[in-house]
Amino acid sequence: MTTNIAAPVAEKVAERIAARFPTIEVVVHPQFLNTFTATVDFTPPTPDAVDISVTVVSDGGYVLEAGPDLVFESNTEPGGIDAQVAEIAEQIETFGQLGVVKLQTRPYLGFLSPTLLGAPGAEPELDKWMARRTSRVIRTWKAWV
């Protein structure tokens, strides 16, 4: 039987992010007895900045949502509590420092154009597409700093 580490991971991530970004409102949704997940919401003080939510499951895996469109699900083998806290906090800190961009890679295709989402400056593929003249930024969510 594996230990449910959702609540401890969520609480430690909340503490780390609150210490790193003191202006961000951090809300930890308590883990109920019959569930195997814990959720933390990070809300910035300005409406144009990126809001983030992370749901941690019992084995330490997680789903991170940044803004209304970007959803990231962990696909690595969960480690211990400290390893999961570090991985999740690193993702959140990247979005908090750099913001999130939604980019249309081939606008001439209209609604069929593929889109990319991510933190500019942290993802080489996104940066490569942003440098092209044919790409178009659809939406930007500002960083927390």
Image: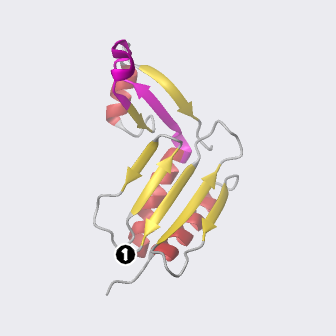
Residue 57 rendering spot, x and y as whole percentages? 42, 69
Left/right placement of residue 10 relative to residue 106 reads right
Left/right placement of residue 19 relative to residue 55 reads right
37 or 61: which is nearer to us?
37
Residue 131 rendering spot, x and y as whole percentages? 38, 21
Q: Is residue 120 magenta?
A: no
Residue drawn at (55%, 47%) of the image: 96
Above-or-below relation of 113 to 91: above
Three-letter residue code for mark 1: Gly
* Quadrant of the image occupied by residue 41: bottom right
- What's the magenta region? 96-115
Q: Is residue 100 magenta?
A: yes
37 or 20: which is nearer to us?
37
* Quadrant of the image occupied by residue 21: bottom right
**SS for tag 1?**
loop
Above-or-below relation of 55 to 127: below
Residue drawn at (41%, 74%) of the image: 58
Indicate the quadrant containing the N terminus: top left, top right, bottom left or bottom right.
bottom left
Residue drawn at (64%, 36%) of the image: 48
Indicate the quadrant containing the C terminus: top left, top right, bottom left or bottom right.
top right
Above-or-below relation of 70 to 139: below
Label 1 sits on residue: 80
Residue 127 rendering spot, x and y as whole percentages? 38, 29
Residue 15 rendering spot, x and y as whole percentages? 60, 67
Rendered image coloring scheme: secondary structure
Q: Name, please, the residue furthest toward the front.
A: 34
Count the marks: 1
Above-or-below relation of 73 to 110: below
Circle 1 crowding by C-alpha within 10 Å: few under 14, some 14–19, many from 20: few
